[in-house]
Image: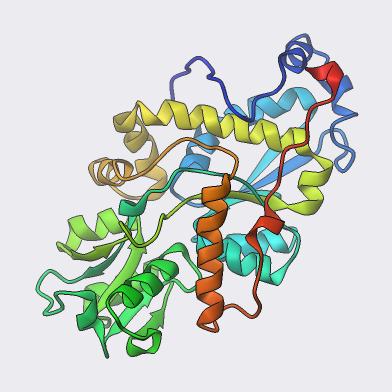
Amino acid sequence: MPDRPSSPSPFGLAPTRRRLLSAGLGLAAASTLRPALAAGGTVRVGYQKYGSLVLLKGRGTLETALQPLGYTVAWSEFPSGPPLMEALNAGAVDFGSAGEAPPIFAQAASAELRYVATEPPAPRGEAILVPKDSPVRSVADLRGRTLALNKGSNVHFLVVRALEQAGLPYDAVKFAFLAPADANAAFVRGSVDAWAIWDPYLAAAERATGARVLADAQGLAPNRQFYLSRRGFTDANSEIVAIVLKAIGEVDTWAAGHAETVAAELAPSVGIPAPVLRVALDRLSYGVTPLDAAAVADQQRVADAFHSLGLLPKPIRVADAVWTQPERRAENR
């Protein structure tokens, strides 16, 4: 992707530190920034095939930002948020992203989870689909029918809210818990009546099969994207986390104004034609920021909903897992 000037970021390094790094003193400064990682360490990033992290990987700008501090980046691809969160909790990755539901289950499983940032809501980027000739005309018509979804993913909460709004109890629908590839196959061959899925798979299914949107998340769920890490990593490497988030903010700013180029860049790795990706990108939101009160409240509603349905083993308090960037020392201001 073409270079562009860097832009201000809520996670940017202090000007003094930037000058130190550009002067070639980054390795010396690094000794005070990363007590948990030795010189020449590796930041392990888990990503999915779509979104800002895959763009960041393609551009290589994170490697450039971390190189003066002696770090490399190891990228690991995951098919969806739940397995990525499992890897994060297990200590196999240091940083990753997921939608609303996966971090809820991850926090219930481990107190190590940390929310470090979020993107704005994108409620048009997930939906419940039915075949174009389906007799199902409303969510209420799903009673007794089979709905495919990835268990514990962002669309799980969409389904909970859509059923609630339609006046259907959660158990009124039969669930087929399938990963996106398997769910797509089941949907195409007619083994399931509906499919809850997110972009870009959503856009691809609409284009390939003429699938009809029964309900998207507008008015039901925010569909936020979160960036996540572990307490052990954030506590020991706050400056590294800030560098990663600043790099994401820069690629976000670039992507927001270059949709055609982004679609062409993503198409080979995602395996979806650029015109279809462009549809998905038009429903995406950009602008990485720390979690504010609204984002925390939205996530708490997700957690409470899952717990009330018995899907979450215990109640959790989302605010307990929100990372706050430490204030910089006076000499770096």
Residue drawn at x 62%, y 35% as measured from the top left: 245
Residue drawn at x 26%, y 83% as measured from the top left: 191
Q: Which quadrant would residue 216 be assigned to in this image?
A: bottom left
Observer-nearest residue: 321 or 63? Answer: 321
Q: Is residue 202 visible?
A: yes
Residue drawn at x 64%, y 66% as measured from the top left: 106
What colour scheme has been applied to the protein in the rendered image? rainbow
Q: Which quadrant would residue 286 be assigned to in this image?
A: top left
Residue drawn at x 38%, y 30% as measured from the top left: 256
- x, y (%) of residue 173? 33, 86
* Number of marks in the rendered image: 0
Q: Quadrant of the N terminus?
A: top left
Q: Is residue 181 above or below residue 242?
A: below
User: Is 194 on the left-hand or right-hand side of 70?
Assistant: left
Observer-nearest residue: 312 or 87? Answer: 312
User: Is 69 on the left-hand or right-hand side of 2?
Assistant: right
Q: Is residue 85 above or below residue 187?
A: above
User: Is 177 on the left-hand or right-hand side of 274?
Assistant: right
Q: Quadrant of the C terminus?
A: top right
Q: Is residue 322 above or below residue 55?
A: below
- x, y (%) of residue 189? 23, 77
- x, y (%) of residue 136? 15, 78
Q: Is residue 200 visible?
A: no
- x, y (%) of residue 138? 18, 74
